[in-house]
Image: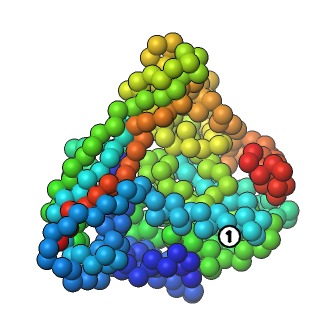
Amino acid sequence: MFDMLVAENLVDLIEEEGLRRSFSRVRAIRLRIGALGHVEPAALYSCFDEASEGSIAEGARLDLEMVPGEGWCPDCSEIVSVEKLYDGCRSCGQGHVRITAGEELRVLELEVE
Amino acid sequence: MCTMGSCRTGHNHAQFSDLAGVINFGADLADAHMPGTRAERIIRLERDILSKNGAFARANRDRLKAAGIFTLNLVSSPGSGKTSLLVRTIADLKHRFPISVIEGDQQTSNDAGRIRVAGTPAIQINTGWGCHLDAHMVGHALDHLPLNQGSLLFIENVGNLICPAAVDLGESHKVVVLSVTEGEDKPLKYPDMFAEADLMLLNKIDLLPYLDFDVRTCIQFALRVNPQIQIINVSARTGEGLPAFCHWIEWRASLMRRPAHASL
């Protein structure tokens, strides 16, 4: 849902790092992305193409490491897998699951020149 | 002045015109590339992609808290009646609190104009191509507002139910406005916004007799996404529900100013 927002912030962050660490071109960007709906890989790729145009990240390859959704269900007292945010627990159906993984939006590393 | 010192990146240079009270963003593109080395290398970052906004938001929140300013970030789809609601609310509260307003739109200063007619200082931020306000823009706007001790600040975000959910501005609370001319399943279609908000105002309630909108179902959907959300039915046209909204503001503002209850 936030693909353009994420792509723009990513490009800003890379531009800043480029100034700070003196690199002028980025060849690849490794991201860790949670699977719980904030970002759709296909949409992120195309938003990134648009947002990075004319920047030092233009043409860079995006490598996504996807993290599956997971949460703690206090009713079951265990970690359960979560497919969609705001859905109830998959084993007991209660809506008290606290998300523990799957919301990541992190940039891990850049391959630069 | 931008306290985070990263305006030098070339993007988001704010252009403020004192005469019009408008700040324009997104007008110029990044052009400050530094020459780098040719050798390839790996740079480890391990950072949240949205961390820059988070830092600006923390700075805004600290600044507002130090001045005892209670801040609401109003979010909704376009056309939900946020500005009309704000004009009525300001009229009801301006004798009890000093009030300032930050208006966010892609273009025009029409909304800030409507607020100023009501006698309240307002800064218009035009986001250009941006679909939401961010904490950096709001930090610039704060420089141009009278930040009186104990005042209220309303930030009317760009009409958009998606991105503003993920962008902290440093506000005390997000308030989502949903009008009954929209679908009652909006909380399910755009759950992030309803999950982030502490209060939902169900607006245009005076139109209910002419619509098939099911208030009960809508409230159930909102509570399914966010069991803690509070809900007030209002009409900016007739004034119904506005006393309850004003009470909510006074109550929450008083809690914020009592350090023992700061986390409520």
Image location of residue B187, percent across then percent down: 51, 34
Q: What's the amino acid at mark 1?
A: Arg
Q: Quadrant of residue B37?
A: bottom left
Q: Say which of B225 and B234 sits in front.
A: B225
Q: Is residue B117 above or below residue B251?
A: below
- Left or right: B100 with respect to A99? right
Image location of residue A89, percent across then percent down: 49, 19
Q: Is residue B192 above or below residue B257?
A: above
Q: Chain of mark 1?
A: B
Q: Residue at x 57, y 82 (%)?
A: B1
Colouring used for the render: rainbow
Q: Say which of B107 and B207 sits in front.
A: B107
Q: Is residue B76 above or below residue B36?
A: above
- Left or right: A97 with respect to A102? right
- Left or right: B257 with respect to B38? right
Q: Crowding near pointer 1: few (<14 within 10 Å), some, many (20+)?
A: some
Q: Residue at x 49, y 33 (%)?
A: A99
Image location of residue B137, percent across then percent down: 51, 70
How many discs appear? 1
Quadrant (top left/top right/bottom left/bottom right) for the N terminus of chain A: top left
Q: Quadrant of residue A66?
A: top left
Residue matched to label 1: B63
Tag 1, which secondary structure? helix
Image location of residue B28, percent across then percent down: 33, 79
Q: Is residue B5 above or below residue A37?
A: below
Q: Residue at x 29, y 51 (%)?
A: A31
